[in-house]
């Protein structure tokens, strides 16, 4: 491993046939630098966990904690070269910082003091504001009144709640990017501007949709509106708002302010994009809750070969047939028959929800993934369904046969099916005519009388 890293650091740049050797190692922010950081920091988590196991920690009541419990009190979250250490005791945290520093210095790395913060999640700590930013999110606790408070597992009221929001720095950066594009597209047609902005907005709001974001999304949409208004003002400096509003903003689906050219092109709104995904993914019995992010299990890696886990998360996997991966995602990795999650070593089988022999189709709607043993049980239950279906089919066949027979026996005009029985028309004609008021209405009066006084009656 060491040799490989060394080779990467010393790798030069090849341009055509010439090779330019590099002397400065990997540039910061380069493709490989997060990977190197990842390799370097890999042991930190283990090191800190081992350290906390060796410390004597006590519960508030005074009893000593078990080792495994001690390990749980310290939280370490790491992404590339960025990491957060969480503990409720400030002294332990300070100690952990020192240990991290010495551990890093062994590798020739150092903790930058201007980038390191020690803060509290709910209250001010010295001059530091509560909460911290990590990976573009702001993580902070807020005080709540008793009506909004959550409860602990013991039933005690927690007077605070955790909100994870897009960090201020990131959403301002995003807004500035959009503002710049609008500025640059001053003279471009509306369609071009919409095409440029849509993927940016969609991507950004999809990244943050799992957080407490709706307030910030609305805010950005509001700011974008004012930018777009300026854009429109610039295009038509001498025209009134009465001209510009209907030209660039259309009413679509109850929203009077959709930036659109009146055809299919319209600007996505952050809030709307979020609301729609929320609506799509809302589950029964869970009000006002959209898609929630499921954490990747801590020991998982995309290269661990667990095709079932990854395809039920992502809906695709290179080592898994697409149809099965899709079904796994829809079923959230669970077998609908027994309700248990599929494991990597389980044998799965595709089942027709309504059996083919009972008239079920072969489309995705009618397919599901079951354990092999669950599939066997289901097939047993299906036999009844199939028998019923075959019976019904048989009856229908006989019915059709008898109609055919009647048709051969009498000519079509003389009899009709009424309430499942063949009735000769000559005996029930009056009621038959009055059953079709539509026909009577459109026919002329002359015809009407002629029909009433028909010889058939
Ligand atoms: Zn099952």
Image (cartoon, rainbow, N blue to C red):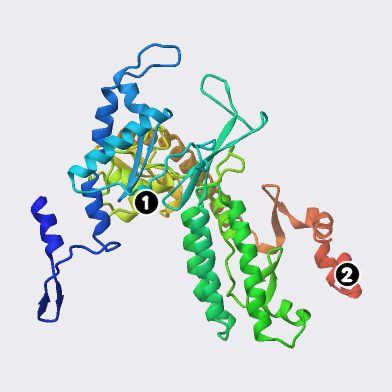
Q: Is residue 143 left or right of residue 236?
A: left
| 244 and 375: which is toward the camera | 244
Q: What kind of element bears circle 1?
A: helix
| 421 and 297: which is toward the camera | 297
* Image coordinates for residue 153, horizontal then vertical, percent: 51, 22
Q: What kind of element bears circle 2?
A: helix
Q: Nearer the viewer, mark 1 or mark 2?
A: 1
Q: In this picture, is 388 found above or below 193?
A: above
* Image coordinates for residue 349, horizontal then vertical, percent: 31, 43
Q: In this picture, is 97 found above or below 203?
A: above
Q: Is any part of residue 131 visible from this angle?
A: yes
Question: Residue at coordinates 57% horizontally, 84% vertically from top-left?
Answer: 189
* Image coordinates for residue 65, horizontal then vertical, percent: 35, 16
Q: In this picture, is 145 found above or below 434?
A: above
| 350 and 112: which is toward the camera | 112
Indicate the quadrant of ligand 1 in the picture. Answer: top left
Dot 1 or dot 2, earlier in sequence: 1
Task: Identify the disc placed on residue 314.
Answer: 1
Q: Which residue is mark 2?
A: 448
Q: Is residue 409 left or right of residue 206?
A: right
Question: Residue at coordinates 65% horizontally, 69% vertically from top-left?
Answer: 225
Q: Is residue 106 left or right of residue 428?
A: left
Characterize the local packing of mark 2: few (<14), some (14-19) or many (20 or more) Cα atoms within 10 angstroms: some
Q: Is residue 60 left or right of residue 416?
A: left
- The C terminus sits in image quarter: bottom right
Q: Is any part of residue 319 visible from this angle?
A: no
Q: Residue furthest left?
A: 3
| 415 and 43: which is toward the camera | 43
Residue at mark 1 to residue at mark 2: CA–CA distance: 67 Å
Characterize the local packing of mark 1: few (<14), some (14-19) or many (20 or more) Cα atoms within 10 angstroms: few
């Amino acid at each position: 491993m060491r040799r490989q890293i060394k080779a990467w650091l010393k790798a030069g740049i090849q341009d055509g046939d010439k090779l330019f050797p590099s002397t400065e190692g990997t540039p910061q922010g380069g493709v490989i630098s997060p990977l190197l950081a990842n390799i370097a920091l890999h042991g930190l988590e283990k090191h800190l966990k081992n350290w906390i196991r060796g410390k004597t920690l006590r519960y508030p009541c005074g009893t000593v904690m078990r080792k495994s419990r001690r390990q749980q009190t310290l939280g370490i979250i790491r992404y590339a070269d960025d990491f957060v250490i969480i503990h409720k005791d400030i002294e332990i945290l300070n100690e952990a910082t020192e240990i991290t520093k010495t551990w890093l210095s062994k590798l020739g790395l150092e903790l930058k003091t201007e980038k390191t913060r020690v803060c509290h999640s709910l209250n001010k700590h010295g001059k530091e504001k509560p909460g911290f930013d990590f990976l573009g999110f702001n993580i902070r606790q807020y005080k709540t009144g008793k009506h909004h408070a959550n409860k602990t597992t013991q039933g005690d009221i927690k007077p605070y709640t955790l909100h994870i929001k897009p960090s201020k720095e990131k959403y301002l950066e995003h807004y500035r990017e959009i503002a710049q594009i609008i500025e640059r597209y001053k003279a471009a047609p509306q369609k071009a501007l919409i095409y440029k902005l849509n993927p940016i907005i969609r991507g950004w709001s999809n990244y943050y949709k799992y957080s407490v974001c709706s307030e910030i999304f609305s805010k950005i949409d509001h700011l974008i509106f004012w930018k777009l208004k300026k854009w429109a003002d610039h295009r038509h400096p001498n025209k009134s708002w009465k001209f510009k509003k209907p030209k660039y903003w259309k009413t679509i689906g109850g929203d009077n302010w959709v930036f659109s050219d009146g055809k299919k092109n319209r600007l996505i709104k952050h809030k709307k994009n979020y609301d729609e995904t929320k609506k799509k993914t809302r589950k029964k019995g869970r009000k006002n809750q959209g898609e929630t992010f499921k954490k990747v299990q801590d020991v998982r890696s995309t290269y661990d070969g667990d095709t079932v886990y990854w395809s039920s998360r992502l809906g695709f996997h290179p080592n898994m047939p697409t149809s099965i991966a899709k079904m796994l995602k829809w079923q959230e990795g669970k077998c609908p028959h027994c309700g248990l999650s599929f494991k990597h070593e389980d044998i799965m089988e595709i089942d027709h929800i309504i059996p083919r022999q009972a008239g079920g189709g072969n489309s995705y709607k009618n397919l599901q993934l079951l354990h092999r043993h669950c599939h066997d049980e289901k097939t047993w239950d299906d036999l009844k369904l199939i028998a019923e279906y075959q019976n019904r089919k048989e009856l229908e066949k006989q019915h059709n046969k008898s109609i055919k027979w009647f048709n051969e026996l009498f000519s079509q005009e003389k009899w009709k099916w009424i309430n499942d029985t063949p009735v000769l028309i000559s005996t029930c004609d009056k009621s038959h005519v009055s059953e079709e008021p539509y026909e009577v209405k459109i026919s002329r009066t002359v015809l009407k009388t002629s029909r009433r006084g028909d010889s058939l009656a």
